[in-house]
Image: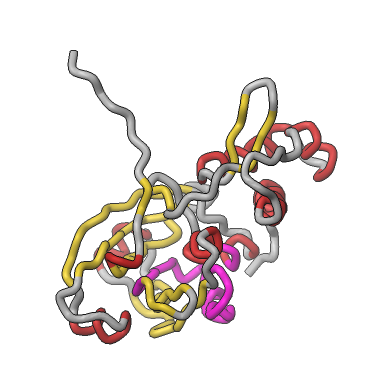
Amino acid sequence: MSSFVPRYYEIEQALRARIDTLEPHSPLPSDAALVEEFGVSRMTARGAVQRLVHEGLVYRVPGRGTFVADRRAHRSATHILSFSDEMRRKGKEPSSRVVESGRRAATGTEHERLGVDEVVVLRRVRLADGEPIALETAVFPARVAGVLGADLTRSSLFDVLAKAGTVPTAGRAVLAAEAATAEDAKLLEIKKGDPLLVERRLIRDQDGEPLEMTESRYVGPRYGLDVDFDVELPR
């Protein structure tokens, strides 16, 4: 796999590291300062910052600049955020326990949604401070089979993909409430029938190509989503 890292992702990760050391409402470098520091175009610098704006990590004030946002307790339902980053923002230590990994032929649904005949499957229990939060099954095109060689017990899968030149960029998710199965109960250390928040999503890469089909089964009382919305007034 290639080791190419997009420049906007490099800037984004550098800003994330700075944000972790700053108090809410602290100023961040201007777009012009980022252009000079990283030797990129203004569009690239602005795009990196805008991704952080969409994620809720920073906010812009016209005429004044970009500032560190208050930390949210949960991920926003409208933005992609890796589980590892999400837990660290809560002050928790993320980790994973791999349940299954390998290559196999794509199912009919996987072939239809990912457009491939062979897939890579990665199934993990996601933990925060050692407590099971979710059972996650991720399915990828076989072209990213290199993820199977990465140590994903502590590393973010999003980071592994991005460092290989494949950046998770956008997607669509469907949420549902379901009861825990016997397998869920065993792996997540809960009771069969306990409430789960189930998220099924399809994520695309920076080129708009299907990258990941994921089902995440979150323990209801241990996880939540923030939802921003507009109110449509009657006409």
Location of the C terminus by quadrant is top left
In this orientation, which residue lies closer to the viewer: 96 or 123?
A: 96
Asked where in the image residue 49 lies, by quadrant, the reply is top right
Residue at 24% in and 82% down: 185
Q: Which colour assignment does the render follow?
A: secondary structure
Residue numbers of the magenta segment: 134-160
Residue at 51% in and 76% down: 95
Q: Position of residue 186 (x, y in %)?
A: 27, 86
In this orientation, which residue lies closer to the viewer: 39 or 181?
A: 181
Q: Position of residue 210 (x, y in %)?
A: 42, 55
In this orientation, which residue lies closer to the viewer: 150 or 228?
A: 228
In this orientation, which residue lies closer to the viewer: 10 or 27?
A: 27
Residue at 49% in and 60% down: 86
Q: Is residue 54 left or right of residue 138?
A: right
Asked where in the image residue 44 lies, by quadrant, the reply is top right
Location of the N terminus by quadrant is bottom right
